[in-house]
Image: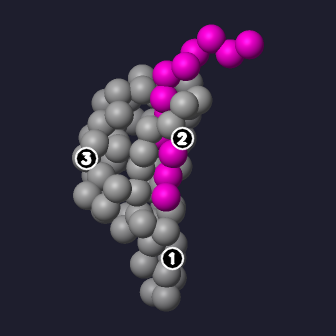
Amino acid sequence: MKTDARPIPAFKRKKCMACKICVDDCPVSCIGVAPSGSAKDPHGYPFLEDETRCIHCGQCADNCPVEAIRMVAA
């Protein structure tokens, strides 16, 4: 049974505009954003680089201007 019920970031990739505010706001630098690399796809691809470093603060979700990140149960 999992005892750690703290939420983790979940990403809505179709909403991400690769502004990287979440990357800059993360106090432990555990989020990354890769651009799509295509002019036809303006979205970014946010990801959790290292789940073990995440402190579950929710700053990434709180500060995302397009609501591409939400905190969900782990």
Rendering quarter of residue 39: bottom left
Mark 3 vs 2: CB contact within 8 A: no
At label 2, the amino acid type is Glu
Q: Which residue is mark 3?
A: 63
The verdict on residue 11 being magenta is: yes
At label 3, the amino acid type is Asn
At label 1, the amino acid type is Gly
Q: Look at 42% across and 78% down and name the residue there.
A: 42
Q: The magenta stretch spans which residues? A: 1-12
Type of colouring: one colour
For label 3, the SS is: helix
- The disc, 3 or 1, on the residue closer to the chain's N-terminal end is 1
Which one is in front, 36 or 12?
12
Rendering quarter of residue 3: top right
- The disc, 3 or 2, on the residue closer to the chain's N-terminal end is 2
Residue 72 horizontal/vertical position (percent): 50, 37
Q: Is residue 43 visible?
A: yes
In the image, farthest residue toward the right: 1
Instruction: For marks 3 and 1, give the one nearer the viewer.
Output: 3
For label 2, the SS is: loop
Q: Distance of mark 2 from mark 1, alpha carbons? A: 19 Å
Which of the labelled discs sits on residue 37, or is there none? 1
Q: Is residue 24 visible?
A: no
Q: Look at 39% across and 35% down and name the residue there.
A: 29
Q: Which residue is mark 2?
A: 49
Which one is in front, 73 or 43?
73
Q: Look at 35% across and 34% down and name the residue there.
A: 58
